[in-house]
Image: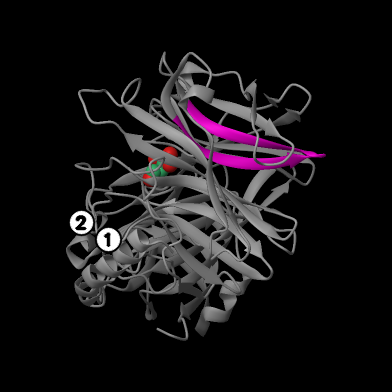
Amino acid sequence: MNPLQQELQRAILTEQHDLRNLVVQDFWRQAFHEMPPTGWLNDPNGLCQFNGVYHLYYQFSPIDVAGGLKYWGHKTSKDLVYFQDEEVFLYPDQPFDLHGVYSGSAFIKDNELHFFYTGNVKLEGDYDYINSGREQNTIHVVSKDGFTITSRKQVLGMADYPPGFSQHIRDPKIVQYKDSFYMILGARTRSDQGDLLVYSSTDLSEWNYQGTLLESNPSLGYMWECPDLFTLNGQDILIISPQGMEAEVDKYQNVYQSGYFLGEMDWQWCRFKQSGHFQELDYGFDFYAPQTFEDEQGRRMMIAWMGLPDIEPNYSNPTVAFGWQHTMTLPRELVFLNGKLYQKPLPAYQQLRRELITRHLTVNGECNDQQLFGEVYELSINIEQLTSFFAVHLREDTEISFHATNGQLCLSHGESGYGRTLRRLALEQLDSLTIFSDRSSLEVFINEGEYVLTSRFYPKPGKDRISFSGEASINICKWDLIKADN
Ligand code: FRU
């Protein structure tokens, strides 16, 4: 650590002291989701498992709850359930990243960790910061342990990016094919279309431009952030987070999207031939910038930011008053089955299960059970029979409902949504719901992870009833979830 970093670290720790006192007073502090110790959190970065330890780095503004200058925060875990906060991994302290250590990924080679991230620089002056006034440099960091840095060098700068592109080029992801390495970068063209740049390398240091990965498409917005590419069960899958897509009735309802294409990667030409249209990964209010990695058991894991940029004034987060903002989704395993991408909650989370309540219920109108309540829990509902309408009501004013007649699943919040009102998705049949309720978030897995809705909400303490309405016959299991150190 250099002297500037040491002084920065001391200054941050002092400022964090007061923020920590606020954070501990917050009822909406998460019980089993990862949140920043203080300040602001956004994208997961550098996800990997290295010598048995899971590393979760993330976009972090430790002392600016509104998200100012970005650092890489760091958490580690042995099981993806219990995480430990570590020291900041990357500070924006170099000429190539002075205005933010932006998003990036990790790549393991010869028992060393290679991180690639975007160094954001904004020049002083009268610029639009899209086509002028900005640098987004690509930086390579080597580490032998994930905590200390052996080298940190710029490998690409503005002069290395092709003509026709704006200065928004970021979020490198590395993929290996045979003996070559490929870097994919999210980009915005000068004509305001999203695109992906591909570079190749044989040593992770020298990178050569190969072209664009995908045919760009004006209906997919003006900028594609956070690309990810992997093969699952023989299927190539490309993830992007596009900005600027038009909303439809039951699609693309958030300010920005995150989704994927199925297709086939042609490594000879560095082109991804999509075989289907863009599909959203999540239908809730708060899901963005997902990143995946393969763990040592060969599982494809995904974590996303449970939040979105530029949401105000439509909705807000009351935790800002308590010195922190945003959280990560639960880690999910991606599974490709029968032509579909499923997201599965990790079985490891079952260790948090405490008291179990099971019921077989015949719902006919309103259905209340005095024993069914809670704030931090997992609720699994299997539908035996459903006529036309079925709804689950939980916490202060949240409803998850299924309308069989028009094939629509809805998630709605009242006041507790702080501006979040209604999200819907087209669904032919509802077989099951698995709901993870934390103090200020909800993840709803539909039909064993065929669809997911992820949302922040802020119900008042003690508003904890779980009830049902409609006409259905259901089996439920509900577990309180408790983390041992909570
Ligand atoms: C996505 C994103 C990335 C960028 C980072 C900055 O949320 O905008 O494109 O690298 O956040 O924090």
Residue 20, image quadrant? bottom left
Q: Marks 1 and 2: in contact by CB < 8 Å?
A: yes
Which residue is at 34% across, 44% downward?
Answer: 98
Label 2: how many Cα within 10 Å (few below 14, some 14–19, many 20+): some
Q: Is residue 67 left or right of residue 485?
A: left
How far apart in space, not on screen, are marks 2 and 1 (Cα)?
A: 7 Å
Q: How is the image coloured?
A: one colour
Instruction: Give x and y (percent) for residue 267.
Output: 76, 28
Location of the N terminus (image quadrant): bottom left
Q: Is residue 172 left or right of residue 245?
A: right
Q: Is residue 176 magenta?
A: yes
Mark 1 highlights which residue? Answer: 397
Instruction: Give x and y (percent) for residue 57.
Output: 49, 59
Element type where label 1 sits in the image: loop
Element type where label 2 sits in the image: helix
Label 1: how many Cα within 10 Å (few below 14, some 14–19, many 20+): some
- Tell which circle, 2 or 1, labels the residue nearer the N-terminal end: 1
Q: Which mark is residue 271?
A: none
Instruction: Give x and y (percent) for residue 128.
Output: 27, 23
Q: Is residue 266 left or right of residue 122?
A: right
Label 1 amino acid? Answer: Asp
| Residue 328 showing in the rendered view | yes
Q: Residue furthest front?
A: 3
Q: Specify start and end residues of the magenta stretch as a single range.
A: 169-187
Mark 2 highlights which residue? Answer: 415
Label 2 amino acid? Answer: Glu
Q: Is residue 204 magenta?
A: no
Instruction: Give x and y (percent) for residue 21.
Output: 21, 77
